[in-house]
Image (cartoon, coloured by chain):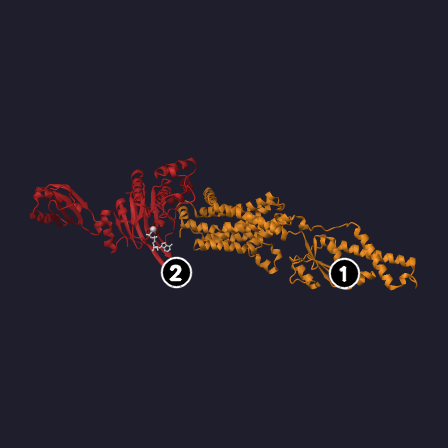
Amino acid sequence: MRAIIDIALNDLRIFFSQRGNWISLIVLPLAFTAFLGWAMGREFGSTQVRLDVADLDGGPAAAGLINRLAASSDVIILCPHENDADNVCHLDNGETALTTEQGINRVQRGRSDALLVIPAGYGQAVQTGASAQLDYYSLEDPTQPSPILQTVNAVLQKVNSAVVAQQMDMAMLEALVGTDAGSPLADEKTRTAMAASLQEDAQRLLDSQPDLVIFKSTAPMETSSLDQGFGQAIPGMGTLFVMFTVLGGMVTLLRERRQWTLQRLAVAPLRRSQILGGKVLSYFSLGMIQFLVLFGMGAVMGVNLGGAPLALLAVMTAFVLCVTALTFALAPRMKSEQQAGGLSRLLALTLAPLGGAWWPLSITPPFMQTIGHLSPVAWAMDGFQTLIYNGGGLPDVLTEIGVLLAAAGVLFAIGAATFRVGE
Amino acid sequence: MDTMVKLRDLSKTYRRSDGSAVEAVKQINLEIYKGEIFSLLGPNGAGKTTTISMMSGLIAPTGGDAFIGGHSITKEPMAAKRLMGFIPQEVALYPELSARRNLLFFGKMYGMHGSDLNKRVDEVLAFIDLTDRQKDKISTFSGGMKRRVNIGVGLLHRPELLFMDEPTVGIDPQNRRRVLDTVKQLRDEYGMTILYTTHMMEEAQELSDRVGIIDHGELIALGTQGELTQQVREEDQIDFAIDGRGWSSELEARLLQEVPGLTRVAYAPPGHGDDSAGEESLAALTAFAARGRQALPDIIRILNDAGVEVHSVKVREPDLEAVFLALTGRALRD
Ligand SMILES: Nc1ncnc2c1ncn2[C@@H]1O[C@H](COP(=O)(O)OP(=O)(O)O)[C@@H](O)[C@H]1O
Ligand SMILES: [Mg+2]
């Protein structure tokens, strides 16, 4: 064991004796993470949810409802009505109106968070005081209170109350004034104008009342935009740079064989397993240092990294083990340091975006999410997201850790069987 | 004589990636005795590095075995490796680390620690004369200095047996001199057994107690330098400086008749030979004999009988280059 630690410490000493490595281990990752964290804090971190509205009625009453909904909350973006130049609604073809089918499809694909359908005949129903049913679709857990639904209900409540108030007012007017010929209410025009004006007054009165429930922010959005951006950027850039650093070990292994220092270890009275163990420990340590640098920066900045630091450490460990194992499985197949360097960069730069290190996989189409999970990065990012955004703990990320460790096991077996020193 | 190393049918066949096989070492048998310098002499590509790599446990033989102090390198590698120091052909050091750091690290790999290790590193640094540069990175060293550190690493654990694979390749004559002197010093003062590989005849000739000549993976000759040159029955050349006054053609005939192995005699009167520069009155007599050293007493006796005074004698044995030439029909440096 002592020899293993001595080998690893020596490797770390060599690694840190080169200024370039400080830059690639600390300066670059910190710079990238900071840049991405703030950029994504604006993009993904906008504290908004998208509510699709399929207006099948198209009349003024429906438009009024939509306006009221739009005014009700800054958090809720009505789509497509409130879409902006950045396509905040994630519309596929810049639609200006949505059908029910389109809306449902969008909810299912995660393009929007919920769909409200205003049925044809809504305006008519409002006017006659008949009941109009509005359908609400979402992927939300029906047993959980939905902030979007609560907001919609609050707005509908007021609209309905205004309708009820207007009808009661009209009934009272009719009782006072009568509806006989000669009464102003006998004239249909006057009667409609009166009704409309009464409803407006009622609505104005109701609107001036404070809301009982106002949707300011949805559950995951309790975090600040800083947390939102860095919660993605830190694990994302962490996994990317861990891969750069650890996969770079392939180059170091080849270089050590070229400069014969590896052979020198092989003729010392050491077991092969000790040499292998020392090398594995050194690259594993570098990977962990890489993660800790970035998560440490997050902690110093006060980014909310969830409430389970040990579970976070477990996900990091599983991921670094997996990448270390990959390094040792591939290294014996490398013919030259150039080839190894090229492959390590190529792998890092494909596995990272594929696995959602640069943007959340949840905004990609379902088949990309499936393919993405071929990358260990996806499993790590799932774990990090559960811990950072969803307040999960160790039991919630055991699947991710299990998958990463299983992959690490297989890859280590290949690496250990093919690790060569002399020939 | 105690045996330190024994090779039994040691063989290595490399498999190339294209499927072809390279028989780099073919069934080598030899013994290296305790306390001797044994040279493995052969041209580039002869199989020296492959042989020394198998002996040190770096690569596995495809046939046969090597025994170090009685321990099989394939079956008891740990025990065998503890006995040996290894100085590779390459400068096998971490260029980013200082000389001292390199020594400390490899010392630990041989199980040394703490103040023991520190003291030993001080000793080795003094031995390789780099105490004042110990804190400097290897990358700032000259080729000769790197070679010295490379040797120092192999000496750290005070091995009984030292493997040196072409330790003078690529260094200047001054540093080469230093390395050769160090090798002799290690045998003479520290009683080490040394296996030294080289493609340079002069080095083998200067250092070795015994020599093995290797070519195309085969051990084609083995023995002391004398034995090897005798094997090829090359004649010795004996140079005499004599008082020319007693010389006669009868004396020449008598020598050729009475001295066994003597094949030819050449006489140069005073002033002709450049060997006796400064001694104008002396003549040079050159004799060629199959066994020069054995012929020598007879020649001197007969010259004395004839009243010819012998002032100096020099026996020049045929060199290893000639042996290699005779065995392979090629020069060593081809
Ligand atoms: N790893 C290897 N794979 C295939 N052939 C090799 C390998 N190493 C050495 N050889 C071949 O084996 C022969 C002996 O090489 P080597 O032992 O290095 O010779 P030397 O040290 O005497 O110069 C050469 O023909 C060389 O090309
Ligand atoms: Mg060689």
The percent coordinates of residue A3 (x first, y second) are 45, 43
The percent coordinates of residue A63 (x first, y second) are 76, 60
10 Å neighbourhood of mark 2: few (<14), some, or many (≥20)? few
The percent coordinates of residue A381 (x first, y second) are 59, 52
Q: In what element is the residue under mark 1?
A: helix
Q: In what element is the residue under mark 2?
A: loop
Residue marked by disc 2: B19
Which chain contains the residue that carries disc 1? A
Depth check: give the residue in front, B217 or A27: A27
Which chain contains the residue that carries disc 2? B
Residue plotted at (38% across, 51% down): B60
Depth check: give the residue in front, B122 or B304: B122
Residue B78, label in figure: none
Left/right of residue B316 with respect to residue B151 in the rendered view: left
Residue plotted at (22% across, 47% down): B226
Mark 2–mark 1 Cα distance, whole angstroms, equals 79 Å
The answer, for residue B291, to whether it is visible in the render is: no
Tell me the kind of residue under disc 1.
Ala
Tell me the kind of residue under disc 2.
Gly
Task: Give chain A's shade.
Answer: orange
Which quadrant of the structure image shows residue A124?
bottom right
The percent coordinates of residue B269 (x first, y second) are 10, 46
Nearest to the eye among marks 2 and 1: give it.
1
Q: Which chain is red?
A: B
Residue marked by disc 1: A62
The answer, for residue B66, to whether it is visible in the render is: yes
| The CB of the residue at mark 2 lies under 8 Å from ligand 1 | no
